[in-house]
Structure formats: C-alpha cells, structure tokens
Amino acid sequence: MASDTSRFLSVRDDQGTLRVSVADAWTLDAAIALNDEMRALAARGASSVSLDGSGLTALDSAGAWVLGRTLRALSERGAAVQIDGLRDDYRALLEKTEIGGLDIPFSIPRRPALVGLLERTGTSAVSTFHTGVDLLGFLGLTLVTLGRILTGRARLRWIALLRQVEAVGFDALPIVGLLCFLVGVVLAYMGALQLQRFGASILTVNLVGVSVLREIGVLLTAIIVAGRSGSAFTAQIGTMKVNQEVDAMETLGLSPVDVLVIPRLVALFIALPLLVFFGDMLGLIGGAVISVLYLDLSFGQFLVQLKDAVDFWDFGTGMIKAPVFAYVIALVSCHQGLQVSGSAESVGTRTTASVVQSIFLVIVLDAVFAIFFAELGI
Amino acid sequence: MSPAELMAATDDTVDAAIRVRGLRTQFGVQVIHDGLDLTVRRGEVLGVVGGSGTGKSVLMRTIIGLQRPASGDIELLGERITASAGTPATRRLQGRFGMMFQDGALFSSQTVAQNIQAPMRERGGIPGDLMDELARLKVQMVGLPPEAGAKYPSELSGGMRKRASLARALALDPQVVFLDEPTAGLDPIGAAAFDELIRDLQASLNLTVVMVTHDLDSLATICDRIAVLIDKKIIVDTLEALTRHPHPWIQDYFHGPRARAAFTPGRTEE
C-alpha cells in the first residue's frame, strides 16, 4: 500500500536498539496501511526494541494485532522488547492478541484441479450408486406400507390425500393444458409444412394423433409434474426435516412414510393419469385447430381422419405409462426430501437432485416402454 | 467515562451511541411502540427486557434499520437511520455496528472463517494474509478453538454457533454491538462464560452493547443499566433503582422467585 504511514509509525535505529514510536489511531485502516511495513520490520530483527506508545489515540483489535504480531516476531528473533507509555487498556488489548494454533489449517485446503476433478467424479459415482440402492429400499418400504394399507393394517390419510390430489392434479390443469395445447399446435404446424411437400398433408392428423397419444402427452405432463410437484414434495418434506418436524412426528409414534409419503404418492398416482388424459385431449385440440386453419379440414374431417389413424393401443400405451411415471416421481421426490439434513442449502441441493433424477428416470423408463411395446407389437 | 460520570450525565448531555426520539412502530393496526425515547450511552452495556410481544427484537431491528418505523427519529453513532439498505448513511455505518442474531444466523454454506471474513470482504481493501490473521484473532477472542475456523455452522454446537456469530459481529471492530438473547439456550456454565466474554470484550474493545435478554444473571452481572419495555414505552435505569420502581410488571419481574435468586446480594460478587 503506497499511502503515507509516517503519522502512525516512526522507527529509529539507536546503536542496535530499535526505537519504535506509534501514534495516531491504530484501527483497521491503519492496520491495512501498515501490514506490509510491519512485516518488513518484524523480519529486520534487532538486539533490543523499545516501543513508545504515548502518542496512540485509538487502538482496535486489528491495530493491536498488527502491532502485537510484530513485537512477538521481534522477540522470537531474540530482541528484548520494552514497552513504554502505552495506556493500560491498550496494553491489555495488545496482550489479548497473542493467539495460539496458527499452524492449524483455517480453511478447507483446496486440492489441485485435476485431483479435485477426479475426487468429485469418484464421490459422485459412489453417491449415485448409494442413492440407487437407497431408492430401491425406499421403493420396498412404500410397497410394504401400501400393502399394509390395502390389508387394513394401516390407515390411509384421506384428508391429506385429497388435499394433495387438489394441489398436484387440479391446480396443475391450466399449465398442463396450455403447454400440451401449444405443443399440439407446434407439431401440427411443423408436420403440415413438411408433409405438404409430398402432398400428404392429411397425414398431419396421423402425426399429431399418434405422437401426442403415445409419447408427447404423457412425457410432457410427467416432466411438468416432476418440476412442479416433485420439487414441491422435496422442499416440503425437506423443510419439515430441517425444522425437526419429522423427528417430532416419529416421537409421537407417527411414521413419516405413512403421514408424508403415502398421501403424496397415492395422490400423484391418481392425479397424473387424469392429467395425462387432459393433456392428450388438449394436444389433439391444438392439432385440430391448426388442421382447420391451415389444412382446410373441417373439425368433422379431422375426427374421421383421427379415428382411422389411431387405435386404442396408441391411447393405451400412453395411459399405461402415466401411473408408473407418477410412482417414480413421487418416490424420488419424497426420498430426496427425507434425505435433507441440517441446512437450508441442503433443501436446495436435494430439490435440484429430485427434479433431475425424476425427469431422468421418466425418460429412461419411457425408452424402456417404447422397446417393450415395440416387441409386443402394439 | 467512569461509571459515576455515566450515571450523573443526563440523556441530552451524554455522549450517546444511540438516540431514539418519539419512536412509533406498528404492524397493521397493532401498535408496538408509541412515543418511545431511548438514549444509549457510549461504552455502556444496556440490557433490554420486557414481556413477550412487547417488541424487544423489533426495537433492535428498527434501530439498525432492518425495519422502518411509523414515525420518530433514530440516530445511531451520529447517523440518522432510514430503513433502506444502501443509502449513504447505512453505508457509512457499515462496520461500525454489529448484530448477533438469536440463532446465530450464520451463513450455512460458508465455514466459520468465511463467515467472519464476509464483512471484511464486503468492506474490501484488506490484504488476504491480514484477513486470515484477523479471523483467527476473532475466533480466539470469542473463545472458540482454532479448529472451528474450518468447520461449517451445522457442525458446531449451539453455544459455539453463538460464539461464531459474535465473532462475525465483531469482525470489523464495531463500536456498537447488538445481541439478541445471547445466552438463550446455553447451559448455566456456558451462559456465565458468555456473559464474562461479553464483559471482557466490552472492556477491551470499549464497546457499547445493547442486549435483549431474559437471563436474570446476565442482567445482574454485566448490564450497567436496564431498559424495560412496558406500555409501548421504555424505562431505563440501573438494576437497583428499577427494583424500587412502582410499576406492577416491573415489581413482578424483579421480585419474582427467580429474580430474588439471581439478585441476592453477594451472589453477583465473584
């Protein structure tokens, strides 16, 4: 620092004795300005040091630290240190700056980039594996609990269930409907543009019908629900975990799986197929609107063509996937919610993980279903 | 200023760290403070007491500008407070006061050392090596072991979190420190140690301390004066004078069985 420090400090070498006088206000500003200079002074060494503190008008812990650090360093190098004219309270503060454990690492050591990268890769691979194993265990736990409910040995919480159906199902109708409608519009529009070139624009109806019913409707809805309700499940359960509400529940003899997980799981199991059906219909309507506007079809002709283009199994394959996706989304998000520990940051991390994992699993399962149905020939 | 001089000075002549005049705060129709006056003298430890819901924390938050009063003037270290961050006054005050929140309010994604350095980084201009050393100094001053610096708040006990939070409040050597229930949730030994720590730091750093507390021992041992929030106003006096105050709530407070145990003469003399 280039600022003038002469008002704080003057050093005079008097036949081997370092006469140091300090003056003015030794506060944080002074400490910053004097940091380098005092280090140099400490490195200089002397046979004896005499400090005159009579001119000091203020001293805070930062100033005291820089002064104390220097005096201790000089004394360690064999100098006899004598302090004069320092007020008693300043002297007491100066003594307080003598701290131990300077060799104990004070921050988490940063590793070299490559080692860090390898370490993170390894950690995430291992933790992914553990998450997978845990998730299977959790799947078992929910199935057993559902079994106990079905055989009448545990109670289903109807009010919680209905509230969840409303939150994840009914409240999601507008957004699911709108997005499916728009995707239907886009599909039909793009299809019409391409198919017109072959004079086969009527096949736009087939394109929209088959793709919406088989894939788009269910996939889009599942992804919206994973982002909308899956994240909410994780954040709700996670925050309850941070507030120790989950612990409180257990001490009251309530199982968090019964109270928190099962209602959400069953609610999504009921609501997602209904949402998918709704999304399918809106997607088809989107296609119909474009067909009527751009292909000069009447709405009746659209329906006739659609009836020829799709059979029951186009609709069926889509609908079969819905409850499976629902189960996966609820399972992953509740599992992640229960994994939250301690901090607010953990809620955020787990919510992100929950959405990423459920969307990933939904798309992987969708691919598995596609192969499965292809093999079955439906 | 000696204690005798402090006592002799009147509110208007005294060198005030905080001056509150005619403060009124309200939430909706609910009035918390009405016409509240308070003067905190430089270098004193002021304990703030009051029943639940009398607005002890609200008063503190209003003084440091986290909440806007409905009316009234607040002066903190000679700067008028307005409840909006980033105004010149609040920037000038940056680093001149510290606040320790009830549950610590440490940043959970940062280590203790990073928490303590957060105000230093915000201030800017402090060399990295000095910043590390100062953080170590604060950790030692609040009585934490040096190993605590590299730990995350979730790895600390409640008492250690409070100490770490105090270290963060002291990071830039403030002149005024606000403490919200510093000893709540600590065991009696930990609470006594914390009291001693506050007294100690107050003396060596010449701090002005305003602390909300329900800890009768803290009131008896470390507070120079006590402010009682009552009937939307505040009554400030020494412990001795307050025990003779005729108000029924104050009588109850300072003459209840717990108070008698804490204030028995001779017990506070260590």
Image (cartoon, helix red, strand yellow):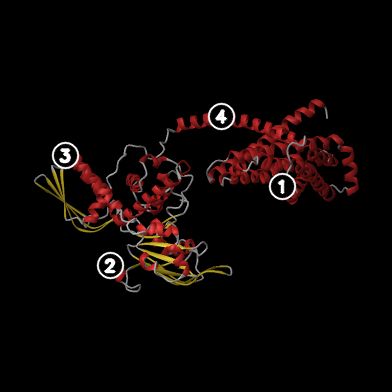
From the viewer's perspective, is the residue at label 1 or at label 2 nearer? Answer: 2
Q: Disc 1 is attached to a residue of which chain?
A: A
Crowding around mark 4 (Cα neighbors within 10 Å: few <14, some 14 to 19, many 20+) is few
Q: Nearer the viewer, mark 3 or mark 2?
A: 2
Marks 4, 2: nearer the viewer: 2
**Label 3: which secondary element:** loop
Residue A261 in view of the camera: yes
Residue on which disc 2 sits: B4
Q: Amino acid at mark 2?
A: Ala
Q: CA distance from mark 4 to mark 2?
A: 68 Å
Q: Which comes sooner in the sequence, label 4 or label 3? A: 3
Secondary structure of the residue carrying tag 2 is helix
**Residue at image x 35%, y 58%?**
B222
State whether residue B244 is above or below residue A178: below
The residue where tag 4 is placed is A125
Element under label 4?
helix
Residue A69 in the figure: left or right of residue A144: left
**Tags 3 and 2 both on a single chain:** no
Q: Is residue A277 left or right of residue A46?
A: right
Q: Amino acid at mark 3?
A: Gly
Q: Check if mark 3 and mark 1 are on a common chain.
A: yes
In which image quadrant can residue B98 be found?
bottom left
| Residues indicated by labels 4 and 2 sit on the same polypeptide chain | no
Which residue is nearer to you in this view: B149 or B228?
B228
Instruction: Give the crowd class for mark 3: few <14, some 14-19, many >=20 residues within 10 Å.
Output: few
Q: Which residue is mark 1?
A: A160
Report the front residue among A253 and A221: A253
Distance in Å between CA atoms under marks 1 and 4: 37 Å
What residue would you read off at disc 3? A78
